Image (cartoon, helix red, strand yellow):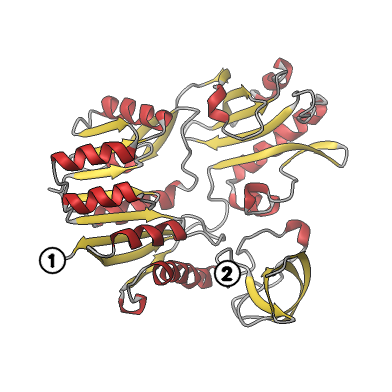
Amino acid sequence: MGINGEGIGYIDQKIAFIKGALTGEEVLAEIDVRERRYLSGHVVKVLKKSSMRVPHHNNDKKTYGYSLFHMNYLDQLPFKKGLIKDAIAKYTKFDVEELDVKPVLSSDEVEHYRHYAAFPIVYSRGKLVFGELEGVDHFLSVDDLYRLQSPVINTTLNKIQKILNEHKCKDYYPRVKCGLRYIMVREFNEGLQVVFITGKDGIAKEVTKEIAQIDEVVSIYYSINTSSHSDFNEKGFKRIYGMNAMTLTCKDQDYKINVKSHMIMNPEMEYKKYDVLTSLIDEEDEILSLYSGLGLWEMSLPNDVTALEENEYQLDDALKNRDRIKEMNKFFKLCNIDKEIVRLCKKKTYDKVVVHGGDITEEIAKSIILSKVPAVILEGKNMSALGLSIEKLQNRYHITYVSGVDVDPNTPLVHAIVKLERNER
């Protein structure tokens, strides 16, 4: 199977990537894309089924994305473990068969676990709908996403969609730069935060007033953004209704999160990932954390931590939460990480460097190596970036731990955690 969970076969000696096909199956497929070097398509009918297939799965093209809903969940975990092993084997000199690669940590909830949803708002079949575009999320179909999002988000999205249509709202028209573009919904302790991205005309007060009457909605924001790309934070947000900072509980500690900060999609598994990371460090270690985000893991530690971040909104939340809960042995800094790590590693040698996202640049790798950092922990879900990062360190470090955490069940994504220790001279 391919890295996106598609089945791989051959048609007239040309490789074909088929959505919905599993290893060992014979299928009737419709080809959607014909390129010089490959074909891609989707399953129309399964002729010979795999034991991994979920019975009665719908293979209709309209509802099928790059998900793994057609695959038994327990069979997904070895597949995801294989993705981690393949990345190490492809990009590094290490013999992956000699590594003790741990099983992928499974999720208790395999559907409706996401606490975040984001959709384009489009006009289709005579009404406004959320997300009925080819390549929603660049990854999953709308139906896939609805199966992954929490029930309260789905119910609320349906209510909001009904309100928008009753008020005859319009979707975004680039030529005049007016209309509704995107909707985002985030689930916190207090309830749901709803965010609209709109054209220059914004959103009508009577519409948001009615949305505010939905019991689950506790906060509404909007941002006017007519740019062709989707960095919505650049234009700022205006609060229309309800709460400002929202609350997220991690390890029995409450944290305040602003509207511009990234959302944790699957808190249960995110916190299990934190447990794995914590198990790889000692209490006396001094930690350098790169791309620390909201800093939730860092603030759950007893250790002294220096945390670097390039996103000002994430960093602002981290600083405010640190001061509020009095974790004063945590130092958070907004900076160019490539430049700052050079300065820090010249001053001292940290016991461990943790790289969130698992992607290190040549400058970061050079600083780690020259500073003789005893151990490096990489964590992230981009397998190519992870493999390339290990490659940059492989001449001075060896792998001592590899595992995965299934933060995204029923998708071909896996969160890998790799620990490398410095070679003895």
Q: Where is residue 81, by image quadrant?
A: bottom left
Q: Secondary structure at mark 2?
A: loop
Q: Secondary structure at mark 1?
A: loop
Query: Which three-letter amino acid code belongs to the residue tagged 2?
Result: Gly
* Residue for point 29% across, 31% down: 333
How many tags in the picture? Answer: 2
* Neighbour tally class for label 1: few under 14, some 14-19, many 20 plus, Cα within 10 Å: few
- Residue 33 percent coordinates (x, y): 75, 63
Check the image and report above or below for 112 versus 221.
Answer: below
167 with respect to 79 (left or right): right
Check the image and report above or below for 147 versus 173.
Answer: below
Query: Which three-letter amino acid code belongs to the residue tagged 1?
Result: Glu
Q: Quadrant of the N terminus?
A: bottom right
Q: Could you say which is closer to the camera, residue 347 or residue 249? A: 347
Location of mark 2 (residue): 2
Location of mark 1 (residue): 424
276 with respect to 347 (left or right): right
* Residue for point 66% across, 70% down: 17
